[in-house]
Image: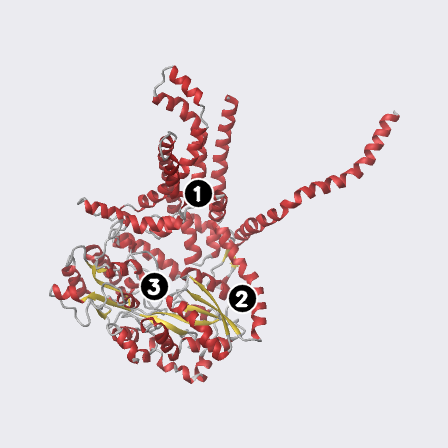
Amino acid sequence: MTVTTSARVAAATARPATRPPNRMRAWATRAPLLPALVFMIVVTQLPFVATVVISFFDWNALYPKDRHFTGVDNYHQVLSDPDLRQSVWTTILLTVTVVLVSLILGLGIALLLNRKFQGRGVVRTMLIAPFLVVPVAAALLWKHVLYNPEYGLFNGLLHYVGGPQPDWISNTPLLAVEASLVWQWTPFMMLILLAGLQSRDNEQIEAARVDGASDWQVFRYLTLPHLRRYLELGALLGSIYIVQNFDAVFTITSGGLGTANLPYTVYQSFYQAHENGLASAAGVLVVIGSIVIATFALRVVSSLFREEVSRA
Amino acid sequence: MRTQSRRTPRVLFAAAAAGTLITPLLAGCSGAGGAGGGSSSHSINVLMVNNPQMVELQKLTAANFTKKTGIKVNFTVLPENDVRDKISQDFANQAGQYDVATLSNYEIPIYAKNGWLHPIDSYVKKDTAFDQQDILKPMTQALTAADGKLYGEPFYGESSFLMYRKDVFQKKGLTMPAKPTWQQVADLAAKADGAEPGMKGICLRGLPGWGEMLAPLTTVVNTFGGTWFTKDWKAQLDAPEFKQATQFYVDLVRKHGESGAAQSGFAECLNDTTQGKTAMWYDATSGAGSLEASGSPVKGKMGYVPAPVDKTQSSGWLYTWAWGIQKASKNPDDAWKFISWASSKGYEKLVGGKAGWANVPAGKRSSTYDIPEYRKEAAAFADVTRDAIANAKPNDPGVQPRPAPGIQFVGIPEFTDLGTKVSQEISSAVAGRESVDSALKKSQKLAEDVAKKYEGS
């Protein structure tokens, strides 16, 4: 009895005595992170809140006296605009094509680079280079140095062998944009998949070989399942960036010939139409769309990770 | 690292864009403070586009203007799209951070209507040395707003004309009429096509953009008797004249124009002409300066004639980078002194002597074309350029009355967006992916939406 009461008393006195130091300690450990947190909120969350607020206004920068609250009118306008719906479709098409093609190419290159040969380091560095080029510079390179029908490299080479002189961008605008993006993103996929290949268990492969497995069987039943999570990671990260691609579309076609994607359309309604409200509404919808896709994709990926772990 | 730094600006694209809307409010405070401190010692802030003429001005200001007047000039120099954006934010909020900004003749009437600009009539009247009478008439007209007051002074200006290879024409036995019609130009383009290996008949812009393809195309529409809108704001993009002009333009560039036309703007056509890939080029008069620059392979080989016409007497466009004073400026007097110096006759002579006569910011004063040194340098195109500008009618460019000023544009805020969207449709037609009819049908709908706002006003 006395033991319990004294313990209770001790607990009662200890609690208020120890709590403040604990809390202070907790804050002291958190404090160094605070500037970063505040900075994060200021540069990402406040502008987002402002965007949401602006998206409910009819606000054209060139009609300053006409600014007024319109409710969800902007959203209605965005969703009923055929151009915008077209640009959503273009974005999906662009993203899926670029991600798939660069994954396949990246896988092939990664498999080749995983072998030992002379000058491997140099070749790897050179293959990564396209990813390090500034996106707008890469787009300019493709537009002028490669595609240009008058002085571009492609038609120069074709001319040399007496081939036809196609107008690449006009004939196949979306493909032209996709090719330049595939060129940029293949090294990224390659890097991720190469890391996957390097973590492959060599003993397993040796055992399979002893059992008489062919190259294809090794690839199909050992390498590919092992690379699955890396492929998924590559596809997820690639999709997130390519959905947002602006530079290639802006530079190569200026949004013409049916290549305008969502970010370009948002840019256009902000910079050309000065429709701050409309552009904000479109931007908010893009963010919501990205969050939905990212959450969905992340959930798929993490469930796969769990599967792997439980299987192991 | 890359993933982090790339993701934020892309996902939150519009969020970031909206963020910049807030910055002028914050910047306004510091700007006001800065201007207040500076007013005692006389300083002004100037925001301008980074064209070579402006960069030259920046170099010459301290040693000449500041030395003479004691007014310090702080320049902010940005690329065209950025400068437009920054100017519209600063002026729309009347933040007063910049006293003077470079504005085009598209923006000045719109800004003036919004009450963002300081009228300069009283300054012009007092400043007799500036000599407003010497400024080419269409310039003054284009910078005068609907209220009849003057809101800007040109720094340099341009019109459009037809440039052609004299040597190629001579070799092929072709003659360029002194005042060609578009039909004659189309015939000449057919004959000159292939005059040299890899040479096309004519270069015309096909790159989407209200300031790219739509500028030359709209001048063709004007002279074919078409218009974007009638006086009472009825959209006319599917009218026979507009259709005929667009069909003509698209056919000409598809049959005898440069390859890759749907991606060709001013820069690409300049390149094609310099490299001998085209026999003719219809574009801005400022292109001539580059073609005749020392080191250009076609220097001395070019001939220049007025913009081709059909139903009108002249069809050249009018464009100028002009100075405007922000209404909220605390130093309008000093701002005017700066403008009066930068757009003066004396400044042109200063640049001519220091940087060469080819670099003079021309195309605004009649007297520029009387300076012997300038005439010597620009002999090939001086008179044609002056006449092209002097003959431009910014308020009456076609065969019918217009509801808003502008030759190669319609002077309303919605035009940048409308024009860009329409140009994307017509660019598809240039690339052969769409018929002119369907491109114009879609464009008509866009134009009708814009017109709704104005109908009955």
For mark 1, name the chain: A
Camera-side residue: A263 or B381? B381
Dot 1 amino acid type: Tyr
Closer mark to the observer between disc 1 and disc 3: 1
Dot 3 amino acid type: Lys
Kindly identify the residue that appears in the image at 46 percent across and 47 percent down.
B10
Residue at the limit of the structure toward the top, as seen here: A211
Query: Image quadrant for the N terminus of chain A?
Result: top right
Residue A168 in the image: x percent, y percent? 27, 47
Q: Separation of disc 1 and disc 2 at Cα?
A: 36 Å
Do marks 1 and 3 share a subunit? no
Residue A29 in the image: x percent, y percent? 67, 41
For mark 3, name the chain: B
Q: Separation of disc 1 and disc 3 at Cα?
A: 43 Å
Tag 2: Cα neighbours inside 10 Å, few (<14), some, or many (≥20)? many
Q: Separation of disc 2 and disc 3 at Cα?
A: 37 Å
Camera-side residue: B161 or B118? B161
Closer mark to the observer between disc 1 and disc 2: 1
Closer mark to the observer between disc 2 and disc 3: 2
| Residue A23 picture quarter | top right
Q: Secondary structure at mark 2?
A: loop
Residue B111 sits above or below residue B264 on the image: below
Dot 2 amino acid type: Ala
Residue A241 image label: 1
Residue B373 image label: none
Q: Secondary structure at mark 1?
A: helix
Q: Secondary structure at mark 3?
A: loop
| Label whose residue precedes the other's in the sequence (2 or 3) | 2
* Label 2 sits on residue: B95
* Label 3 sits on residue: B234
